[in-house]
Amino acid sequence: MFKRVLVVAVAALLVAAGAAYILKPERGVPGDAPTIEAMARDVGTSILTHLKRGDFPDRSGDVIAVPKPYSYMIGQWDYTSLDTDQPWSNTTHPNPWDYLTEVPIILRGPGVPAGATIDSPVDIAGLASTWADLLGVQDYDGVQPPLPGAIEPGTEPPKVILNIVIDGAGWNVLEQHPHSWPTIQRLRDEGTTYTAATIGSAPSTTGALHATFGTGHYPEDHGIIGNTFRDETGSIEDVYLDNADPSYLEGPTVAELWDEQNDNRPVVGTVSYEGWHLGMIGHGAQRDGGDKDYAAIWDVPEMKWWINEDYYTLPGSLETTDISRLESYELELDGRDGLDDGSWFGNELEAIRDPKVRVASPAYARFAGDASVEMLRDGGFGEDDLTDIAWIELKAPDSAGHAWNMLNPEVGDVLEETDAQIARMLRYLDQKIGRGNYIVAISADHGQQPLAEMFGAWRISIPEVGNDIEERFGDIVVKVTTSDLYLDRDVMKEEGVTAADVARFLGSYTLGENIPDGAPGADRVPESRLDEKLYAGAFPGSFLRSLTAEKLESYGEGIYPEGRFPITTIDQ
């Protein structure tokens, strides 16, 4: 009897062990995973060139992920919204495809040809070079030449250069809402427009691109690789250290070079949303020979204008924030959508006043316009003949896109108010110093993601990506962002895992794998989609840094038409 029980028990253990083995998650690189070279050929030269320019050793993630076009990485989202009339609208935009990287560059002012359209490939790094050339800035060495045809030879420097960067207003957003920007259209008619401009690098993240505007260099040189980075201790931090601290911005901006060249007599300033935008003006007093330039950024929890006064000066008019003025503008939102119903496009006032949503409405766009004009007035821009440089970042269109999606009317209305505030800044300068005494430049740092459903794409759950990597390779994930994977290099060494292994795994990663077990609404996902691959490619930083110009060229156009934009090349 005992022997019979023993045999049964052993058999049961063997069955259990076999079942556990069968159910055990597969480890290591999947057998069908593509090679890094195969993924490079798929994405092509344009994408890889931008990715290479966006990488900075030891600050960027160990792996950069490239979701397929119109897919994007985001936090956990609600699958019960699938195939309903209220799809999940929140989006992110760090992807490298052309619909996100093609942006306007529009100039108007003395010496700028009127009504000109230039289709030559350029990128936003050329804007700083244009100002350096016009002003005769010494020791400037930007990676792109001045924008072709921007300023007629022999033009005298103006009293003010006003740079306006509309956050999230790439060409795909402007084209979606063509009647929302009459002022910008007027500037096109009166000035010069670059229709084939791109942001020059990837990922398309705010911090990186605003530093490119200011320095005329790409992240591989200026060191601001995004909104977060890995510091020298291995910690993942805000690039401006959550304190408007520009310590990690490598090299000077054109504005601070001009300022220092003239004993800090020119006025330099910015009104922006976050510390991420300080790369437009530079280090302020942190830099040897620099001074405390004007700067104001928005404190989301405290709902006030502030700045790190160790390095910058907060404009006097903004030392006390009149929040009642913003509240009065919010009360006026009702009716902007054509209905007097106590809401704005169905969004209740109290929901709009949530601190994280507040910057996404026309009311905040108007409030930021107030601050911008007040900075220009407080700083005395244009009061002498020595050129002053202002960089204004207008956040509301980007925030509206994140909250409601670029396809929806909220974004169009926010863009309309943003356009009206641009007109207001120009009227101020017209009255203060005269229209013929300043140049205005309009651009954007990226476009926006439309709803994934419109293109058969997918929202990739960041938490599930991290969990699935660890099931495969062990406890190696430090942080997954909307573009970068930061990995624990010590654990990887112990486990015998490489960044290339993780990149190849992402190359085979499927939609079905990305759905958490038991997620509500998972049954709404068509079974036919479960085996879809989510990533066009994923690349270790070491691979990107190894690419020569000849090797980049060899990858050709790739298989995704959305990535085929012209590349400006000064790369050595």
Image: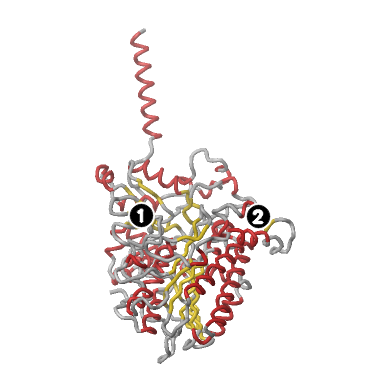
Q: Is residue 28 visible from the viewing direction of this image?
A: yes
From this view, report whether residue 474 is shown above or below residue 39.
above
Horizontal arrangement in the rendering, residue 192 relative to residue 183 (left or right): left
Residue 345 x, y percent position in the rendering:
67, 59
State the image quarter where residue 278 is shown: bottom left
Q: Which residue is mark 2?
A: 347
Residue 257 figure quarter: bottom left
Viewer-closest of 1 and 205? 205
Q: Position of residue 481 (x, y in %)?
A: 42, 53
Q: Amino acid at mark 2?
A: Asn
* Labelled disc at residue 34: 1
- Amino acid type for the residue under numbered disc 1: Pro
Percent of width and height locating residue 422: 56, 74
> Which residue extends farthest bottom?
154
Farthest right residue in view: 340
Give the mark toward the camera: 1 or 2: 2
Badge 2 marks a residue whose secondary structure is: strand
Q: Is residue 495 above or below residue 182?
A: above
The C terminus sits in image quarter: bottom left
Sooner in the amino-acid sequence: mark 1 or mark 2: 1
Q: Residue at x 55, y 75 (%)?
A: 425
Q: CA distance from mark 1 to mark 2?
A: 45 Å
- On screen, residue 478 versus residue 67, left or right, reads left
Split into 4 quadrants, where in the image is the N terminus? top left
Q: Is residue 195 visible?
A: no
Q: Badge 1: how crowded within 10 Å, few (<14), some, or many (20+)?
A: some
